[in-house]
Image (cartoon, helix red, strand yellow):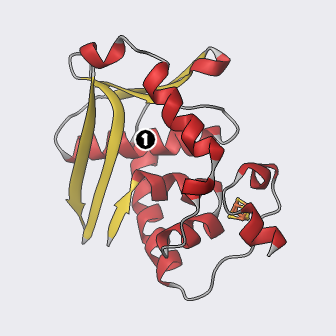
């Protein structure tokens, strides 16, 4: 099974959203937030692309193909930079960056760290990776597989973030 950083992120935000997305029901194109997020990446640090690179990273692990696209990677200092619009689902952002750090480690890049950046909030958070994170991610990829392969869509979560989710109408209005 293929598992990318988006699935890790969704696993932390909402299991229903993960299931819908993974089963091909995609409504992100209707979301202003997604467009806004893309714009944020392009405009927040205009000088950065010259110094750091976007980087695709992947690894084969216990029958899984794991992969992700890092926003910016500072190879000299081994720092992943991940830009986010808001910190509403900060825990999911942390896990996404930890997933990238794990992928680097699986590619023999040891000791890398992450920086979560919220340009609109003028806030940054450091992200570190350790044994507990490794174990959590190992467990999570098996749980994600089980969730996706289940024929039943998980229930709605009635959370604050539902209002800004691209599946809101599908979950609560239809
Ligand atoms: S609207 Fe809420 S319950 Fe539905 S997928 Fe989005 S976050 Fe999950």
- From the viewer's side, name the closer residue of 33 and 71: 33
Residue 98, placed above or below residue 19: above
Report whether residue 153 is seen: yes
Question: Does 78 sit above or below residue 148?
Answer: above
Q: Nearer the viewer, residue 42 or 77?
A: 42
User: Looking at the picture, does residue 16 appear above or below residue 80?
Assistant: below
* Residue identifier under label 1: 98
Instruction: Left or right? Give the position of 111 relative to 131.
Output: left
Locate residue 82 relative to residue 167 in the image: left or right: left
Place of residue 49 in the rendered image (x, y in percent of width and height, measured from the top left):
30, 19
Left or right side of 133 for 156: right
Q: Residue at x 28, y 46 (%)?
A: 103
Q: Quadrant of residue 120?
A: top right
Residue lying at 21% horizontally and 16% vertically, measured from the top left: 76
* Residue 135 placement (x, y as % from top left): 42, 55
**Residue plotted at (51% across, 31% down):** 39
x, y percent for residue 129: 41, 36
Q: Would you place residue 131 above or below residue 74 in this image?
A: below
Which residue: 58% across, 62% down?
Answer: 27
Considering every residue shown, the one lying at the far left of the view is 108
Measured as percent of width and height from the top left, residue 151 is found at 55, 89
Q: Quadrant of ligand 1?
A: bottom right
For residue 35, side relative to residue 128 (left or right): right
Residue lying at the far top in this picture: please name it.
Answer: 47
Is residue 136 at all visible to an observer of this figure? no
């Amino acid at each position: 099974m293929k598992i990318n950083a988006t699935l890790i992120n969704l696993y932390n935000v909402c299991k229903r959203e993960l299931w819908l997305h993974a089963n091909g029901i995609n409504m992100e194109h209707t979301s202003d937030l997604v467009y806004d997020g893309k714009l944020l990446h392009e405009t927040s640090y205009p000088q950065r692309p010259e110094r750091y690179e976007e980087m695709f990273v992947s690894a084969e692990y216990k029958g899984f193909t794991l992969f992700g696209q890092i926003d910016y990677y500072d190879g000299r200092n081994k720092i992943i930079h991940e830009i986010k619009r808001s910190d509403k689902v900060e825990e999911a952002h942390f896990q996404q960056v930890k997933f990238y750090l794990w992928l680097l480690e699986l590619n023999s890049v040891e000791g890398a760290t992450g920086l979560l950046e919220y340009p609109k909030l003028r806030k940054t958070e450091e992200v570190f990776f350790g044994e507990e994170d490794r174990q959590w991610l190992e467990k999570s990829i098996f749980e994600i597989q089980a969730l996706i392969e289940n024929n039943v869509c998980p229930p709605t979560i009635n959370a604050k973030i539902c209002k800004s989710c691209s599946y809101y109408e599908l979950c609560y209005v239809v």
